[in-house]
């Protein structure tokens, strides 16, 4: 009787440990004996039963036993690791590699030794390395988790022909679990080629780069300077020794063709710019663009794009399209638009109206807040005509004035123009709970992957100048990528957002989302 009493007092956590040790030795009979010694109602009995089911390939039982427990926060680390590892195995068998990856990255949080983490990395890689590039790209678009995105990007980098993508991967994910060990091991296992063994500088880093920016326009000079600083910082980070030749534009589109020809005569192999919309539009009409050129603004919609001309910028239309997607994924169907009384606010309101209605949404109210507006009337109209969301088309200063008269219970969205770039700004108190989109560079100020660039950008003012600097950094990386042969969609985790470059050179961008709160601006999601 005493022996039985002692057996029954052994904690279920200990019995689980014994059972898992048996499974490591491929001894399911031993593990089942340990299971029989755990009270049936204990969560640890279900976890061990699920682990045994995974070994016996009874995956229906794995899901039935373990899915209800995955949010349990009271488990021991060993139990939590076993639960998520078993679910990962089951999802692998269901051909659901994203769910398997999610559970294996969760498993890692509960592992306490380098040996266990290394083994977990191998399992992650065994799952990812069998997938096609198309499957990996599709998976990446379904996850907002930076750790998961890092693993997928590592798998994409490993599929590249050369070593450049693998070598640069740690620069984008310096804090990732695979950065120091696993990614370097992958690189060391690749066969050495003449290009990697003898090249003195990265491939494609020959000649000169032309930078065509509006340095001759006083109002544009600070932005042009910040872009050039970001571009140069990214070039230095890449150990690219090419000469940068600066060409100043004055905003007159009639002069852009001559500036382009001058750059070509100077022997540049790639061009950044121009920046203003009129100049980009005029350049896009040229038939003889034979140098890869990354313009930093959109062309007029009626004008086609010339060969060798690629478009990348920070248009508000991109932000608004993403806001509409977010709202409609949450089931929102009706919107009220409240705009400030300036041209930019009008553009934002019009762009939202177009995007929202095109996507099938309905506008309930369209209101403009001016100096002559009666705030009480505005408040009354909004309360009398409730909508699923409010779109606030305003800059930071205007938004602070308008927000107190809006219904705080209605989800309110805005573009990056609402954010001054100062996370802890007491003046933003009226904006609490407003959600907005902006670039990771501003919404993740402490991100490890940006640390090497922070000191370089520290002399620039917050807000707009930091955005232009980030644009310059990403512009270098995009232009450098376009100089190589692009046969499949390429994903770049940039300062301005997640950037996709199609084989045809089409460039798209997904932003991070943030929210004003009593603690300041907080990051909600990363692209």
Image (spheres, rainbow, N blue to C red):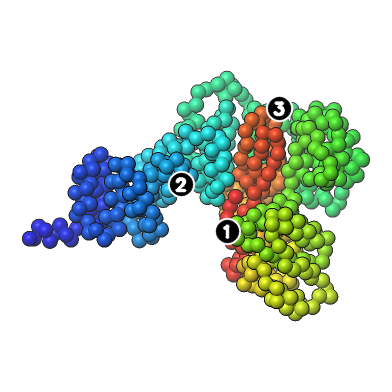
Residue under circle 3?
Answer: 206
Mark 1 vs mark 2: in front: 2
* Image position of 180 (left or right of 46): right
The residue where tag 1 is placed is 524
Which numbered disc, 3 or 1, marks the residue that appears first in the sequence?
Answer: 3
Please name the residue shown 82% across and 63% down the image. 342
Outermost residue, top side: 194
At label 2, counting other C-alpha atoms closer than 10 Å, the crowd grade (few under 14, some 14-19, many 20 or more) is some
Element on which disc 3 rests:
loop
Callout 3: few (<14), some (14-19), or many (20+) C-alpha neighbours within 10 Å?
A: some
Marker count (numbered): 3
Identify the residue at image location x=77%, y=69%: 367
| Comparing labels 3 and 2, the label whose residue is closer to the camera | 2
Tell me, yes or no, whether the two marked residues, 3 and 2, touch with CB atoms within 8 Å: no
- N-terminal of the pair, mark 1 or mark 2, is 2
Q: Position of residue 471 (x, y in %)?
A: 71, 46
| Placement of 159 over or under 124, stated as above or below | above
**Label 2, on which residue?**
99
In the rendered structure, which disc, 3 or 2, sits on the residue that comes first in sequence? Answer: 2
Query: Looking at the image, is mark 3 or mark 1 nearer the viewer?
Result: 1
Instruction: Tell me: residue 236, above or below residue 523.
Output: above
Q: Evaluate if marks 3 and 1 touch, with contact meaning CB atoms under 8 Å apart.
A: no
- The residue sitting at 79% across, 69% down in the picture is 368
């Amino acid at each position: 009787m005493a022996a039985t009493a002692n057996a029954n007092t052994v904690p279920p956590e200990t019995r689980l440990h014994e059972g898992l040790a048996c499974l490591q030795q491929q001894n399911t009979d031993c593990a089942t004996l340990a299971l029989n010694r755990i009270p049936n109602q204990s969560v640890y009995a279900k976890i061990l039963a699920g682990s045994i089911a995974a070994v016996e390939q009874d995956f229906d039982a794995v899901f039935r036993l373990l899915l209800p427990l995955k949010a349990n926060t009271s488990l021991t680390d060993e139990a939590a690791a076993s639960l998520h590892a078993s679910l990962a195995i089951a999802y692998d068998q269901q051909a659901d590699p994203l769910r398997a990856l999610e559970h294996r990255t969760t498993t890692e949080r509960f592992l306490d030794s380098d040996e266990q983490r290394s083994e977990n990395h191998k399992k992650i890689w065994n799952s990812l390395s069998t997938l096609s590039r198309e499957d990996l790209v599709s998976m990446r678009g379904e996850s907002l988790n930076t750790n998961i995105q890092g693993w997928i990007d590592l798998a994409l980098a490993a599929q590249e022909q050369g070593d450049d993508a693998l070598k640069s991967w740690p620069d984008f994910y310096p804090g990732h679990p695979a950065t120091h060990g696993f990614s370097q091991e992958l690189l060391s296992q690749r066969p050495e080629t003449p290009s990697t063994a003898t090249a003195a500088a990265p491939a494609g880093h020959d000649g000169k780069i032309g930078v065509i920016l509006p340095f001759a326009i006083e109002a544009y000079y600070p932005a042009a300077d910040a872009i050039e600083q970001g571009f140069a910082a990214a070039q230095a980070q890449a150990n690219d020794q090419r000469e940068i030749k600066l060409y100043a534009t004055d905003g007159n589109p009639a002069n852009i063709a001559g500036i382009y020809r001058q750059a070509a005569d100077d022997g540049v192999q790639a061009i950044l710019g121009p920046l203003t919309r009129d100049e980009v539009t005029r350049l896009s009409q040229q038939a003889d663009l034979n140098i890869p050129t990354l313009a930093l603004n959109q062309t007029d919609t009626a004008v086609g794009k010339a060969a060798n001309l690629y478009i990348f910028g920070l248009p508000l239309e991109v932000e608004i399209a993403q806001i509409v997607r977010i709202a409609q994924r949450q089931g929102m169907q009706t919107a009220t638009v409240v705009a400030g009384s300036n041209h930019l606010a009008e553009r934002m309101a019009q762009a939202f109206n177009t995007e929202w209605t095109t996507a099938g949404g309905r506008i309930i109210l369209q209101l403009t807040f001016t100096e002559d507006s009666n705030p009480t009337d505005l408040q009354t109209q909004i309360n009398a005509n409730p909508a699923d969301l409010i779109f606030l088309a305003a800059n930071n200063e205007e938004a602070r004035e308008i927000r107190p008269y809006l219904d705080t219970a209605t989800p309110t969205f805005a573009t990056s123009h609402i954010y001054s770039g100062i996370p802890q700004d007491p003046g933003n108190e009226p904006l609490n709970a407003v959600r907005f989109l902006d670039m990771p560079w501003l919404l993740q100020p402490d991100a490890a992957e940006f640390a090497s660039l922070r000191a370089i950008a520290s002399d620039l003012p917050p807000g707009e100048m930091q955005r232009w600097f980030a644009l310059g950094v990403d512009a270098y990386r995009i232009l450098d990528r376009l100089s190589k042969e692009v046969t499949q969609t390429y994903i770049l985790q940039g300062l301005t957002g997640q950037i996709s470059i199609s084989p045809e050179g089409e460039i798209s961008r997904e932003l991070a989302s943030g929210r004003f709160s009593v603690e300041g601006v907080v990051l909600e999601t990363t692209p």
